[in-house]
Image (tube, rainbow, N blue to C red):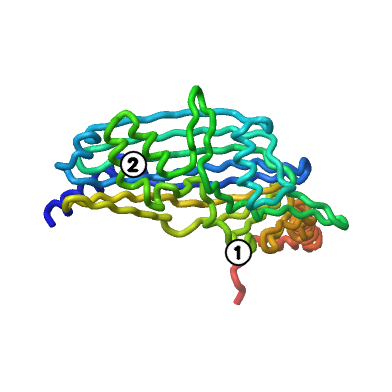
Amino acid sequence: MRRSTATACAVLALLAASLAPGAFASTLAVELNPTTQVAKLTSTSTTNFALSYPANSTLSSYLKGYNSSSSLSGSFNSSTDGLRHFLAEFRDRAGENVSITNMTVSYSYSANANSTALVVEKQTTIIASVAGLFKVSNGSVTADLGWRSFYVSGALDLDLGNQTVDVNLAGSAITQSVLGRGAGTAILTAMFAGGGLWTRPTLNFSSLSSALSTWTRNYDPLTNTTTFSKTVAGNSTFSASFSSGGDAYSLTMKSDPSASISTRGYAQATGNLLVFSKPPAYLDPLLWAAVAVVGVLAVAGAVYLSRRARPNAVAPAAAGPYQAPTS
């Protein structure tokens, strides 16, 4: 009991020291342009892993004091395998009419370990131009956002820098972060590679699948921009455990997705569709400006007229010299 309490405290201490507030945040941002009928997709998937192990274990001897980080990036067009693979996964949710013309990917991780815990933060950012979302029928313009809850189910191997990296699966993120620890990587893989967490995707926005009509909507008439936003309450947490010779090991995975969809123009949601139309007249800022001008002129006119209609005041007669009363 004493050992497990000490281990838990050590894990919490390392988490507090290594992770800034909001470190679990994964964000999906979509900027729609009805004029060009192209959307800019920016997805930042941030996933945190915490591994706990006994201080006297072989794994601890390999990992304690370990620190490592890496940052890689690359650009892809429609002729590259990386973009074609991502598009195939994307079309599973978006349909065959959707196309991606270009994509940039940034991948990074940081790993920190002490005698009882390893913490890994992994982040993948994808920026892509997406076409084929808009449809014009009988003068009505709509955009299908059903793909916003996309996820990549398998490995997404991309050429970043001078190496090929899987930027998606949890197991890949963990092994890549501890490659500098030789046999420690093999031990960790042997413990958890057979479990479901190891093959769980980190590029996963499936929790954003609720209908757009249930998202928070805001229309700004000054910029003529409509925004829909959604935050999933709490963290998405998955865990796995392993035991050997009375020693317990645990691995957890956390993320916290949110999304924002913005577009030029006045749009309302019906299910997963955005329907564009002219804003109601009462939202027109020019109308409100005109009303304000009319109001100011009316007040000014009323003041002017009230002053002109006021009669001239009669000055009181000057008092004569004082005369004493006569008897």
Disc 2 marks a residue whose amino acid type is Thr
Q: Secondary structure at mark 1?
A: helix
Q: Is residue 180 above or below residue 154?
A: above
Q: Please state which of residues 326 and 10 is positioned toward the viewer in this rendering.
A: 10
Which image quadrant for residue 67? top left
Q: Please state which of residues 71 and 81 is positioned toward the viewer in this rendering.
A: 81
Quarter the N terminus occupies: bottom left
Residue at x-position 70% and y-position 63%: 270
Q: Secondary structure at mark 2?
A: helix
Name the spot of residue 202 as percent of width and height, x first. Answer: 47, 46
Disc 1 marks a residue whose amino acid type is Thr
Residue at x-position 22% and y-position 46%: 53
Left/right placement of residue 55 relative to residue 218 reads left
Reading the image, the residue beneath label 1 is: 214
* Closer to viewer: mark 2 or mark 1: 2
Left/right placement of residue 2 relative to residue 221 reads left
Reading the image, the residue beneath label 2 is: 189
